Amino acid sequence: MIRRLDLRGQTLRARALRGVVPRAELDVEHAVEKVRPIVNEVRERGVAALVDLTHRFDGVRLGSIRVPAEALDRALAALDPAVRAALEETIRRARIVHDDQRRTDRTTTVTDGGTVTERWVPVGRVGLYVPGGLAVYPSSVVMNVVPAQAAGVPSIAVTSPPQRDNPPGFEDLPNPTILAACALLGVDEVYAVGGAQAVAMFAYGAKDASGALVCEPADMVTGPGNIWVAAAKRLLKGVIGIDSEAGPTEIAILADDTADAAHVAADLISQAEHDPMAASVLVTCSVALAAAVEAELARQVAATKHVERITAALAGPQSGIVLVDDVDAGLEVVDAYAAEHLEIQTADADAVAARVTNAGAIFVGPWAPVSLGDYCAGSNHVLPTGGCACHSSGLSVQSFLRGIHVVSYTREALAEVAGHVVTLATAEDLPAHGQAVTVRFPGAEFPGAGFPGAGA
């Protein structure tokens, strides 16, 4: 069901390790050319294109791309009380964590009369993407909306693909649980659009046949999606800000012989359940654990609901059991892999986790499975995939903030450093830069500048 890769006795550098660890082949660049015509259609035809594309790809003929407010209210009223309670607790915990991430402005005194203040300002409008497809993700509504709200974003819109198999009363709308989550969070601007066309809608906005703006352009789009969503983000980056090009989900588990094989297997299965392209990787120095996990996978997968999907993910080239000499070697492998989700199930797991440098999120010990982070840990589950955790972070309040430096200098403070500014401007052959300083000090001499102050 899952292949083995034996790296024992080998000493490989990070770049070489990246080439041998299991990884899904995801050709986003090829997908970019596929979505380019879709993006152009939305840019040129607006709402009409969104309606046609939704019918083509989702099998739904929309009467309106925007979800009526009363549908959000009905979805919340019809929500199972247990699901509502779980979502409310998820929201509460997410707010605790994300409210603590809000940065404060800081002023630094560089010299007497010279200060630089870093102001943190939220983006003006964001479009938040919530995937549909094989599963329903109201939790992704929470993970997108809560940090945007904590950052103080004034305009928030959510979009999610319409579903053909919704219950009566919610035909041709996103899943009602997603709508209910939006209502719980106070988001009333929701669209029934998915795929690359949704990213294009937020990038360019969308007008109807009369020229009225139905969806305003956004400054930024965030949220996970399929390869077409990732491709649209890549294509439109620069037109609109993006969080990341999220690919199929992935879990890596670093474990030794202290780990419980049943726990490890269950956690590998939990991520394989998302998608046939999902990656589940165990890195271990214990052959006995590897064998026990293989046995547990065979037993547990047979009892799961989504057997075919899980089996395809576990048997794919993106999944595997990697054997290493020891935990130190395992750390090198997981750092090279840079997993979206990394579990540490070893002796002294806290100390081992502290040595990890590349991961979207780290789950420490036997009682912190990835599923906890998916829902109720308080952390964010919108995380970098495909090895991008070596240079990118998960979604947070910071994702929606921009740092702006505010420079304030008195005449005396500028005079103190004016000679250095002029010297550097001259060294870079940008004399007008220096003149912008010297013009403020007529008659002054600036040694090394090659010219006297203005008016001398």
Image (cartoon, rainbow, N blue to C red):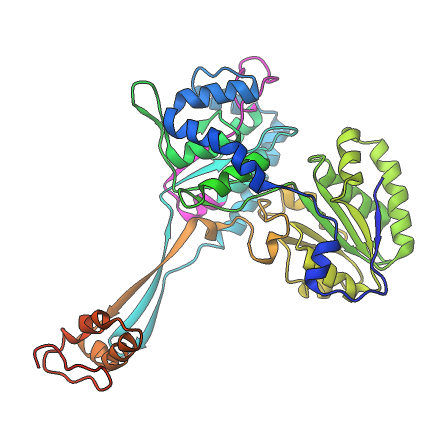
In the picture, measured across the screen, residue 59 lies left or right of residue 442, that is right
Question: Which is nearer the eye, 147 or 77?
Answer: 147
Give percent across and percent down for residue 87: 58, 35
At 52% from the left edge and 36% from the top edge, which residue is drawn? 33
Kindly tell me whether residue 13 is visible in this rendering: yes
Question: Which is nearer the eye, 13 or 182?
Answer: 13
At 73% from the left edge and 62% from the top edge, which residue is drawn? 331
Give percent across and percent down for residue 54: 51, 21
At 79% from the left edge and 40% from the top edge, which residue is drawn? 314
Seen in the picture, residue 93 relative to 8 is either above or below; the reply is above
How many numbered marks have been drawn onto this rendered protein structure? 0
Is-magenta flag for residue 385?
no
In the picture, measured across the screen, residue 333 lies left or right of residue 240, that is right
Seen in the picture, residue 302 relative to 386 is either above or below; the reply is above
Is-magenta flag for residue 154?
yes
Boundaries of the magenta span: 147-175
Q: Which SS type dominates the magenta stretch? A: loop
Give percent across and percent down for residue 277: 70, 38
The residue lying furthest to the bottom in this view is 447
Give percent across and percent down for residue 411: 17, 75
Kindly tell me whether residue 141 is visible in this rendering: no
